[in-house]
Amino acid sequence: MYLMRIDKVAKLSSTVGKFVLVAAFASIAARAQAPVDIRIALVIGNAACQQAALLYNPINDATAMAATLKTLGFEVVQVKDGSLVQMKEAVQAVQARLHKKNGIGVLYYAGHGLQLDFRNFLVPVDANLSKATDVPAQTLDVAVVIDAFKAAGNRMNILVLDACRDNPFSASATTKGLAPIDAPSGTFLAYATAPGNVAEDGDVTSGNGLYTGHLIRELQKPVTRIEDVFKRVRLQVRQDSAGRQIPWESTSLEEDFYFNDGMKHTFRAEDLQRVSSMASNRREQLATEAERAVEATAKQAAVKALEDFLNTELQRLKGLQTALQQSKEAERRKALPVEQARDEQFRAEKSDWDQVRLTKNPADLYAFLKKYPAGSMSELAQFELDRLQQVALKVQVGREGVVPLASGARRFYLGDQIEYDITNVMNGRMGRDRETVTKADDGRVEINDGAEILDQMGSKQKDRYGTYDPPLLLSPAELALGKKWTSSQEVTFSNGQRALVTTESEVQALEDVTVPAGKFKAFRVASRRNMGDLQVTETRWIAPELMWTVRVDRMEHRGGQLQRNLIVVVRSMKRAARPT
């Protein structure tokens, strides 16, 4: 039986090899515009800390990441099991190489990390931490790396910290994991798991940690925006860990960036052939181990290891093929008139969304989000996924003391009531409006006996303008500084006319806002919405603990002429009892 199974997976492996070659040559055809850039990465893997048990995968992770980044055009400075002096010298060396080159600096770190007073520290192998005061003197502050990149004059900085493994330094840390930090200007910051939580290192046979393994595979896909790379990694890590680990990102990037631009910085045919050869060698090694195993239990385990390896390879290559197809489709749409390309994209995504929007199976939503990580319905899909598959991660309270309402949680209950003061800036007139939730369940919220209909995100299905399909998104699944999203829906206006509505939004700040109902710590969200011949510009302040809007500044233009200019503030609010 075992020999039959081995023969089966061997035939499967032959298919894998052919698929690699097809994907290799197909990747050459992918093309994208990318600025000429200087790319330098500092890659550190620390596994053998003197105070901790040996970690399985940081050296493997750092080695694989260094090789991948080199293929993608990065000059790499690599440190393995680095002391504090070696780590600091490496930071200085990278800073010097980047100095005044307007380049792109990357830090990738795998190993132990900890937080202290909302600062994050990377632990060298020679650290001896017995108390909190040892931390600043014997570890590398992430802020030191950020400052070095800033001093170099980089136009973009990317920090990837697979440094949230549970560690023996609890007496020296404020709490587990790393602290939430808002990315400085021009910076993309990625953690292997959410702040205040720990990541899985993996076992000795896995080769790479869960997070880095997925990240390396996503980096190989051509013409994928950096935000989409990390969104897909987040989804796959969450799915594979059954929600125990969910990566986290913070960004302040103002330009698109592609690790693999499909042209200058890409995997060439020989690169993928080398990957194919390495995979073939590993496959043969596992097959030999399975053949040589004598005991039934050992043989069964060896065959399973071989099958798991082949399945992983197939998934990686299928993902690469899908990415190639999507990039070709994106290139085709670029040649179309803007309106036609936008309509095609919307119709394709809307068709897929209609297939899964009522699903009770989280796998359907994972598949949708992997296909459309930044699509116009992705926030709706993320909220539904979080509603169906709630996670039990510890919430790290940020420096501002904000505890946000979890994505997927109900935002409205029967009896909720908000009263607004409305000021027409154009003529000084003031009015008042009251909205009462008269019906609410998991999927539908009726305001004032159906005058407005929302979903539990607060997205509008119906208002005085008309009806929206999918709902008009007013706030995302979750808020974070720098977050950007685009949503689209087809609106049927009250006069029967139809139009495709597109809204582009960005979280600009977390600040204090005072309204008659009180003082709130709220995220300021700027949006621009195209509703046919009506253009709407809004600034909306959303209180994250409630995910309710407490103020809106709104301007409406038609034909270039200002039609309305309103300021809407919450005068009072009454929240119905929430389940405990």
Image (spheres, rainbow, N blue to C red):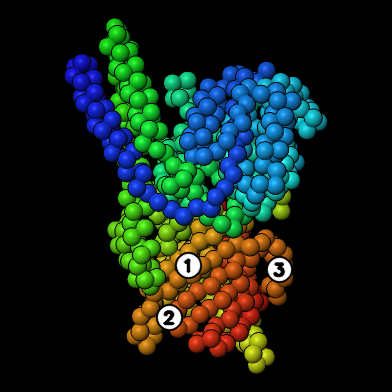
Tell which circle, 1 or 2, labels the residue nearer the N-terminal end.
1
Q: Is residue 528 above or below residue 200?
A: below
| Residue behind mark 2 | 532
**Alpha carbon distance from label 3 to label 1:** 22 Å
Q: Residue furthest top?
A: 294
Disc 1 versus disc 2: distance between alpha carbons? 17 Å
Give the secondary structure at mark 2. loop
The image shows residue 412 at horizontal and vertical percentages of 51, 65
Query: What amino acid is at disc 3?
Result: Val
Q: In the image, which is nearer the foreground, mark 1 or mark 2?
A: 2
Front residue of this view, candidates 436 and 112? 112
Q: CA distance from mark 3 to mark 2?
A: 32 Å
Q: Is residue 508 left or right of residue 532?
A: right
- For marks 3 and 1 on the same chain, the one whose residue lies earlier in the sequence: 1
What amino acid is labelled 2 in the image?
Answer: Gly
Circle 1 packing at 10 Å, graded few (<14), some (14-19), many (20+), is many
Residue 270 placement (x, y as % from top left): 38, 32
Depth-wise, is mark 3 or mark 2 nearer the camera?
Answer: 2
Q: In the rendered image, which quarter is residue 50 located in?
A: top right
Q: Report the residue marked by disc 3.
A: 513
Q: Is residue 164 visible?
A: no
Label 2 crowd bin: few (<14), some (14–19), many (20+), radius 10 Å: some
Which residue is more in the foreground, 265 or 43? 265
